[in-house]
Image (tube, grey):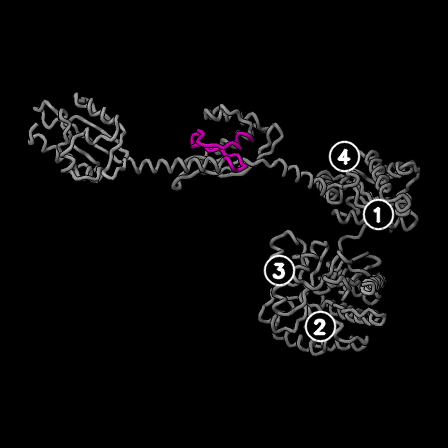
């Protein structure tokens, strides 16, 4: 073939991006090669043209191919092969050999050989396979079951935990039989209708995400999380993640049952009782039907329990619970509040039906009880409250029944008493502000207010180092009125100044009594905003100390953050006057207000009292942990003592001790108690301290 025939093809070869050369079919001589071929082979085009296809063959299969090609290939042949570079490197290529004719008059064609380097594609494929292998290993290592589908629902991936959770037969997953797998999963759930609706919703919205819970017929409970799979922001499929939460659900059920039932008798506890009362209220309001609450307290149970011992006392309570349940209708509720107190909720019960139920309960109690070979008889006192005459809320009804029961016990017990008959009239309606304000003024004049004292404990030694004085009020008509009810009314009416002044004088007098008996304690007294901002407040404090004969350093005034920030400059001046007087100052409920650190540095404050709301969640609540640590670090930076309020558990005390808090108060040691009880507590604590000191002395002497 002449050069005139090859020339146009040479230009064609040079214009190709892929490596290309021309081969003469008979001699297999290379006639032309382009620049891409030079780069691929690592030799010049001139050197390539001095060789032939057989010489360039790198494998035996390649040699055989070119020997056969000499017999004129008519159809294009595409294959994968290797080429060898001068440095011995083998390069994988995709080769296409085509017979082309330079012109229609040419009978003999020329082979156009086009080579494409596959090295990068092979590296990419290897990386992809490695990543797919890692993905498969990751999917199989997680405990969650994973199922991946495309938008049409075809399975594109899954892991072994998915197969195990659903119990899918291996052949179905191996064959990727989407229809069979979907049918299998549908048969396994307990609610196929809801499951189908949910899957239809996913099918209708490719971008829908969700989380739900599935219960399987085998008893497993699975949490399903569904996420749209996206590529460059567009949905391409869906990922389903299944987690076995059976144990968690069962644990929550057990916890819920424990939180709603009495552990000894299995009866509903107060929490569930209140829920049932609220349900009864809803029914009664809808149908205008009354119901009754009966508060049962066993007569003389304490001495019986002490005689029998706790174990036999518990058996007795279980037997009584069974009798009460058997006495009442199934729709009624028998609950245990604790100790020997039970409450019965009787639905659709008027006076006559409530009386009949009470008589049945008393009759059941009077039957002889036999526990561990001992036969005894128990009686009970029942207070009865009726809706709506005795109250329209759970707390009102429970209180009315309790009041009636206590009235009955005071008169000898062993019977029942209706609340609305105890004083010839209905239960008083909720107290108004005017009623409370009027009653408070009468109570102060009549001496009905009293102080209770909550010990403040050295968190390290356990010694009582102070007390906080807290106001209490028991009215002959209103009963016990909690401070949370009367203090806000007193603050709004301004009467808080009068009762606050009374509390201050009473507290310092009590501090002197305890000091003279050998118990010098720091007496902490709460101060209201109205008291603090009175122009003669400092003089009142000085007069109270002088009248009682108490040294100022034994009195601490507790102020809230809101008092200090209302008029910071005036507050600072008054605090400095009090500091010069010698009394100690503390910020109460610290963390609930809006203290300015700039002012806090200037205030002559000695202690910060951490609010109980931050103590409650310790040591598990991470937020409370962070807040408490921050407050304690702030206190340390300002060289202040720290007192934790509302410490109820040993775990809370240990946390505060470790965090650097110096004192605490709360139910863990003692609630707020009256002065006589506090006196006894001080004597016991003092005696225990002396015993410990003597033991230490003996140990030191022996050593």
Q: Earlier in the sequence, mark 1 or mark 2?
A: 1
Query: Helix, strand, or loop for circle 2?
Result: strand
Q: Residues within 10 Å of mark 2 (few under 14, many from 20)?
A: many
Task: Name the residue located 86 percent from the left edge and 39 percent from the top edge.
Answer: 316
Q: Residues within 10 Å of mark 4 (few under 14, many from 20)?
A: few
Q: Which mark is residue 27?
A: none
Of marks 3 and 1, the one in the foreground: 3
Task: Identify whether 645 is placed above or below 193.
Answer: below
Residue where numbered disc 1 is placed? 419
Of marks 2 and 3, the one in the foreground: 3
Q: Residues within 10 Å of mark 1 (few under 14, many from 20)?
A: many
Q: Which mark is residue 629?
A: 3
Q: Earlier in the sequence, mark 3 or mark 4?
A: 4
Query: Helix, strand, or loop for circle 3?
Result: helix
Write down the region rendered in magenta: 140-164
Q: Which mark is residue 331?
A: 4
Q: Is residue 449 visible?
A: no
Q: Earlier in the sequence, mark 3 or mark 1?
A: 1
Of marks 1 and 2, the one in the foreground: 2
């Amino acid at each position: 073939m002449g050069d005139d025939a090859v020339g146009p093809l040479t230009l064609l070869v040079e214009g190709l991006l892929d490596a290309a050369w021309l081969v003469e079919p008979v001699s297999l001589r290379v006639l032309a090669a382009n620049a891409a071929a030079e780069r691929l082979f690592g030799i010049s085009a001139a050197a390539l043209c001095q060789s032939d296809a057989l010489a360039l063959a790198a494998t035996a299969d390649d040699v055989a191919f070119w020997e056969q090609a000499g017999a004129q290939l008519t159809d294009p042949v595409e294959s994968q092969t290797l080429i060898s570079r001068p440095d011995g490197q083998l390069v994988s290529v995709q080769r296409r050999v085509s017979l082309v004719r330079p012109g229609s008059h040419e009978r003999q064609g020329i082979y156009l050989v086009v080579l494409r380097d596959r090295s990068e594609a092979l590296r990419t494929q290897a990386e992809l396979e490695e990543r797919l292998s890692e993905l498969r290993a990751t999917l199989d290592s997680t405990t969650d079951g994973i199922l991946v589908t495309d938008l049409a629902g075809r399975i594109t991936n899954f892991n072994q935990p998915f197969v195990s959770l659903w119990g899918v037969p291996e052949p179905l997953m191996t064959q990727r039989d989407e229809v069979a797998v979907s049918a299998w999963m549908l048969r396994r759930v307990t609610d196929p209708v809801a499951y189908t609706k949910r899957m239809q919703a996913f099918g209708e919205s490719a971008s829908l995400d969700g989380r739900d819970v599935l219960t399987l017929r085998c008893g497993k409970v699975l949490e399903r999380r569904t996420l749209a799979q996206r590529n460059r922001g567009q949905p391409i499929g869906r990922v389903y993640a299944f987690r076995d939460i059976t144990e968690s659900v069962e644990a929550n059920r057990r916890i819920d049952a424990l939180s709603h039932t009495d552990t000894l008798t299995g009866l509903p506890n107060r929490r569930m009782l209140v829920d049932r009362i609220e349900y009864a209220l809803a029914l009664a309001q809808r149908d205008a039907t009354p119901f009754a609450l009966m508060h049962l307290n066993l007569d003389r149970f304490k001495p019986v329990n002490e005689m029998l011992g706790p174990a036999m006392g518990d058996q007795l309570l279980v037997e009584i619970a069974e009798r009460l349940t058997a006495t009442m209708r199934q729709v009624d509720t028998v609950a245990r509040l604790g100790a020997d107190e039970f409450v019965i909720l009787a639905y659709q019960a008027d006076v006559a039906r409530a009386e009949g139920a009470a008589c049945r309960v008393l009759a059941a109690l009077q039957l002889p009880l036999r526990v561990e070979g001992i036969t005894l008889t128990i009686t009970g006192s029942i207070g009865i409250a009726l809706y709506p005459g005795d109250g329209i809320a759970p707390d009102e009804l429970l209180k009315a029944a309790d009041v009636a029961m206590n009235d009955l016990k005071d008169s000898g017990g062993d019977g029942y008493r209706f609340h609305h008959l105890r004083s010839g009239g209905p239960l008083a309606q909720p107290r108004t502000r005017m009623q409370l304000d009027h009653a408070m003024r009468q109570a102060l004049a009549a001496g009905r207010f009293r102080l209770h004292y909550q010990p403040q404990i050295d968190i390290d030694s356990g010694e009582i180092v102070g007390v906080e004085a807290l106001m209490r009020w028991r009215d002959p008509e209103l009963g016990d009125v909690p401070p949370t009810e009367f203090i806000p009314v007193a603050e709004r009416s301004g009467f808080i100044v009068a009762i606050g002044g009374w509390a201050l004088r009473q507290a310092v007098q009590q501090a002197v009594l305890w000091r003279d008996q050998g118990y010098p304690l720091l007496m902490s007294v709460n101060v209201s905003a109205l008291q603090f901002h009175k122009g003669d407040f400092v003089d009142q404090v000085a007069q109270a100390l002088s009248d009682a004969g108490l040294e100022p350093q034994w009195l601490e005034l507790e102020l809230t953050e809101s008092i200090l920030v209302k008029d910071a400059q005036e507050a600072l001046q008054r605090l400095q006057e009090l500091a010069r007087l010698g009394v100690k100052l503390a910020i109460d409920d610290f963390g609930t207000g809006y203290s300015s650190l700039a002012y806090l540095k200037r205030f002559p404050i000695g202690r910060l009292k951490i609010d109980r709301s931050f103590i409650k969640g310790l040591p598990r609540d991470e937020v409370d942990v962070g807040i408490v640590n921050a407050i304690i670090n702030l206190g340390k930076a300002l060289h202040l003592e720290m007192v934790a309020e509302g410490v109820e558990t040993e775990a809370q005390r240990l946390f505060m001790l470790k965090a650097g808090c110096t004192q605490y108060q709360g139910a863990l040691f003692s609630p707020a108690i009256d002065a006589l009880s506090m006196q006894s507590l001080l004597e016991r604590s003092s005696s225990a301290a002396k015993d410990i000191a003597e033991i230490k002395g003996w140990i030191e002497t022996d050593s």
